[in-house]
Image (spheres, grey):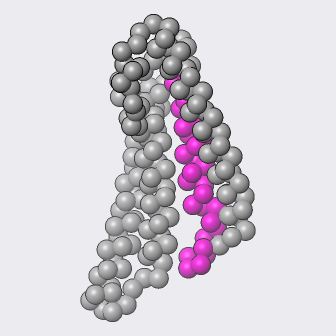
Amino acid sequence: MKWLGTALRHLVEGLMALCLVGMVLAVFGNVVLRYVWGTGWVVSEELSRLLFVWLVCLAATLAFGEDKHLGFDLVTARLVGWRAALLRWLSRVLIALALYYLITGAWAQVVVGMDSRSPVMNYPLALAAGGVLVMGVSMAVLLVLQAWADWRGQAPAEGDAA
C-alpha cells in the first residue's frame, strides 16, 4: 500500500511541475512577444491564472498529506498521553469542519461555473473551482486515512504521506 502513496505523490509532483512549466511558458512567452515583436498571447493571463490555482491546490494537498503545513505546536508538543491524543482528535474535528465548508462551497462554485465561461479562453469556470474541490476532497480522504492510522496505533513517521 505504501507504493500507492509514493506513486500518487509522484503523480501530484509531476502535475505541479507541468503547471509550473505551463505558467512559465505562458508568461515568459508573452513577455518576449510583447517586447520583441510588439504583440502577445491573449490567453496568457487566463492560462497562467488557471494553472496557478491548480498548482496551489495540488501543493496544499501534498503538504497536507506529508504533514508539512504550518502548525503551531508550542503547547501540544509538550503534552503526552491522553491530553495529546485529545487535542490531536479535536484538531482533526476542526479540520474536518473546515473541509466540509470548503468542499460544499467549492461544489457550489463548480455548479455555478458550469454555465459560466471565461472571457478569453472560453473554458468553463468550473474548471478553476474544480481545483479547490479536488483539494478539499483529497484532504478529507487524507484526514480519514491519518485518523484511521492513528486509531490503530500506526501513525505515519514524520514526513511520510498517509
**Residue 50: horizontal and vertical position, in percent?**
50, 64
Furthest residue toward front = 75
Q: Position of residue 94 (x, y in %)?
A: 58, 31
Choose top left, top right, bottom left or bottom right for residue 124: bottom right
Q: Is residue 125 magenta?
A: yes
**Tally of marks:** 0
Pick out the residue farthest to the top.
81
User: For the point 39% across and 66% down, which residue is it?
Assistant: 23
Q: Residue at x 65, y 39 (%)?
A: 100
In magenta, the rendered stretch is: 118-147
For residue 33, above or below residue 28: below
**Picture residue at 40% right of the left edge, 13% below the top:** 79
Q: Is residue 132 or residue 93 the one in the foreground?
A: 93
Q: Main secondary structure of the magenta part?
A: helix
Q: Is residue 102 magenta?
A: no
Q: Is residue 9 visible?
A: no
